[in-house]
Image (tube, helix red, strand yellow):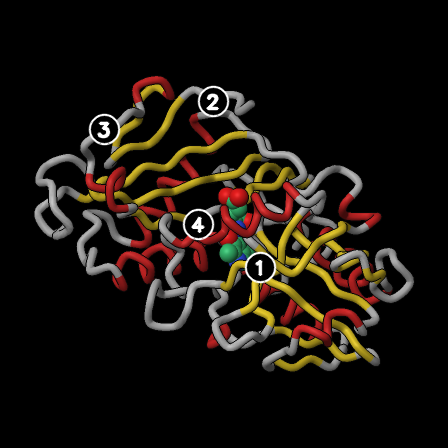
Amino acid sequence: MLTPTEKIWHNGRFIRWEEATIHVLSHVVSYGTSVFEGIRCYATPSGPAVFRLREHVRRLVDSAKIYRMENLGFSAAQLAEAMLEVVRVNKMDSCYIRPMVIRGYGEMGVNPLKNPIEVYIACWSWGKYLGEEALAEGVDVCVSSWTRIAPNTLPALAKAGANYMNSQLVKMEALANGYSEGIALDANGYVSEGSGENIFVVRDGKIHTPPLGASVLPGITRDSVLTLARELGIPLVETIIPREMLYIADEVFFSGTAAEITPIRSIDRIPIGKGRRGPVAEKLQKEFFAVINGTRKDQHGWLSPVHADQPAAAR
Ligand code: PPE
């Protein structure tokens, strides 16, 4: 179960965790009117630091814009500052931050435009998403019988609550069949993404990942993986991936804020490569964890220190 923290930020002020409730007739409840983010704050040797804060705020604002929520009442800079403040106020060293923009209580009916936009930012402690052993051992997954949201239905570039109804179908089916996660194909039958992760396929030393047109969320960890891979000189390509490419890959792995970099050791009970974490995933994990642990120079400015008097990580 979720362990409560003390405070949640709501439209510019802090309220108690228990106070952060909404009316059952809020627009979001009937119609799924929400966009949100998931961000990790890591404990570094120089104090807590939020990973890729700017990019997450930007994606939140982009998601809102797609749904015609033009005025959130706060600038990107104010939202970013509020996210850091939530970590400070709750005295967290490391945590998961969940900013949410919802359409609240007012009118009923599909038209959301008269309903107030409410912004909430919560944080809590969140451990390993796909289990403790997943990062080292890899996970067993399936290809879902559910298709990912099709182009021009629910926009995949927006991180909207409603998208996760599709994710839930993928996830529940996977769990019901004894897998830890499902991989959804896009409307054309090509590999898209996991219920809450982007996906990478390695064959002959080259990384393949589906392009943004394959109904994937523009993952910020995905971008980090691509950046680290380029720096390591690993060839990579964003390209459509046929389902069967998964089975004959040398390695397949997931990326995501919650899942970080999680290797996949089997798909539909077919062992991937040697049936455990492969060298490319391991190399990328090593680099990624060195950045977030503050032991590798943060040359891209990916870490935002939570406390003003805190030195930037490992400079
Ligand atoms: N695809 C989907 C569908 C997705 O939900 C996520 C994040 C990603 C890709 C990876 O994106 P990024 O986190 O920016 O690298 N999923 C979030 C929600 C997890 C949840 O269960 O809630 C996350 O990882 O925080």
Residues 132 and 42: in front is 132
Mark 3 residue type: Val
Earlier in the chain: of badge 1 and badge 4, it is 1
- Crowd band around label 2 with a 10 angstrom C-alpha radius: few (<14), some (14–19), many (20+): some
Up the image or down, 291 lies above or below 1; here it is: below
Earlier in the chain: of badge 3 and badge 1, it is 3
| Residue at x 44%, y 55% (from the top left corner) | 56
Up the image or down, 267 lies above or below 309; here it is: below
Provide the residue designation for mark 3.
Answer: 24
Mark 2 residue type: Thr
Residue 135 location in percent, x, y?
A: 77, 48
Residues 231 and 174: in front is 174
Provide the residue designation for mark 1.
Answer: 145
Mark 4 residue type: Tyr
Earlier in the chain: of badge 2 and badge 3, it is 2
- SS state under label 3: loop
Provide the residue designation for mark 2.
Answer: 5
Earlier in the chain: of badge 4 and badge 3, it is 3
Q: In this view, does 242 lie to the left or right of 1?
A: right
The residues bearing labels 3 and 1 have C-alpha atoms spaced at a distance of 32 Å
- Crowd band around label 1 with a 10 angstrom C-alpha radius: few (<14), some (14–19), many (20+): some
Q: Is residue 230 left or right of residue 55?
A: right
- Check contact, mark 3 vs mark 1: CB within 8 A: no
Up the image or down, 305 lies above or below 67; here it is: above
Provide the residue designation for mark 4.
Answer: 164
Mark 1 residue type: Ser
Question: Does the residue tagged 3 have its C-beta within 8 Å of any atom of ligand 1?
Answer: no
Earlier in the chain: of badge 4 and badge 2, it is 2
Between tags 3 and 1, which lies in front? Answer: 1
- Check contact, mark 4 vs mark 2: CB within 8 A: no
